[in-house]
Image (spheres, rainbow, N blue to C red):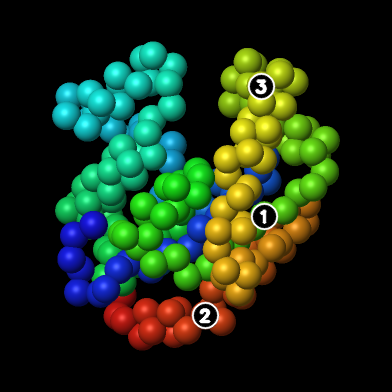
Amino acid sequence: MRETGRSKPPAFLILGAPGSGKGTQGKIIGSIPRFFHCACGDVFRSLDTRTALGKQFVEYSSRGELVPDELTIELWQTQIDNWSDMHVYKPDIDFLVLDGIPRNVEQARILEEHVTVHQVFHLSCPNRNELARRMRKRALKDNRLDDASDKVIDQRIATYEAETKPLIDHFSEDMVTTIDATQPPVKVLWEIIGKVMSLPVYGEVKELKL
């Protein structure tokens, strides 16, 4: 990431299984001034497949292969720089709210070269039946009937358990705030915002003018 006047841009990570509501929370928080929501899906949807990086992405995705971790973070960094150039995201005064990236521990290690993660919000929902119910509801609402199948749902939850959930142990215990994701969304939001406002880095950035 380009030099911004700060050492590394501050970031928060929202972590949770599919259906835990991390995307919903990220979008709401991202609508607040000085917070910028960055979802992994937004990065790939914004990708210009005519560029060298874009062509590399297409090579892997067209074969049905996972994009390597280094390339994933490079794609992310490129898009973040694009948003910065357009003044949509201001890295010197905005908090990044990361959702869906990093997806695994190796991506987290690479990402640490570009941002400083100040807090991880783990939206916990041990009840897998509730997660499946939410995912079916969302798939039907978005008219993605294939995503409502039990096989797809089980696979997505299993992938999260194997690849993404270990991120909780990657970060130090004091950096992880676990929140009951089965609560009403406004209660989950209240707990996230309350924790953010208690962090020293929030006190530093809130003094900057809009």
Task: Name the N-terminal-most of marks 2 and 3.
Answer: 3
Q: Quadrant of residue 73?
A: top left
Q: Amino acid at mark 1?
A: Leu
Name the quarter where the N terminus is drawn: bottom left
- Residue 81 appears at what percent x and percent y? 22, 51
Depth check, front residue: 132 or 176:
176
Circle 3: element type: helix
Q: Residue at x 44, y 53 (%)?
A: 108
Q: Which mark is residue 152?
A: 3
Determine which residue is flagged by label 1.
123
SS type, badge 1: strand
Which comes before the other along the chain, label 2 or label 1?
1
| Quarter where residue 179 is shown | bottom right
Q: Amino acid at mark 2?
A: Leu
119 vs 161, left or right, is left
Which residue bears the numbered disc 2?
Answer: 199
Quadrant where the image shows the C terminus: bottom left
* Nearer-N-terminus badge (3/1): 1
Q: CA distance from mark 2 to mark 3?
A: 38 Å
Residue at image location 33% in from the left, 41% down from the top: 70
> Where does residue 61 sit, x and y in percent of width and height?
38, 20
Location of residue 174 in the rendering, given as x and y in whole percent from the top left corner: 61, 74
Residue nearer the viewer, 73 or 91: 73
Q: Is label 2 in contact with label 3 (beta carbons under 8 Å)?
A: no
Q: CA distance from mark 3 to mark 1?
A: 21 Å
Residue positioned 55% across, 63% down in the render: 171
The answer, for residue 59, to whether it is visible in the render is yes
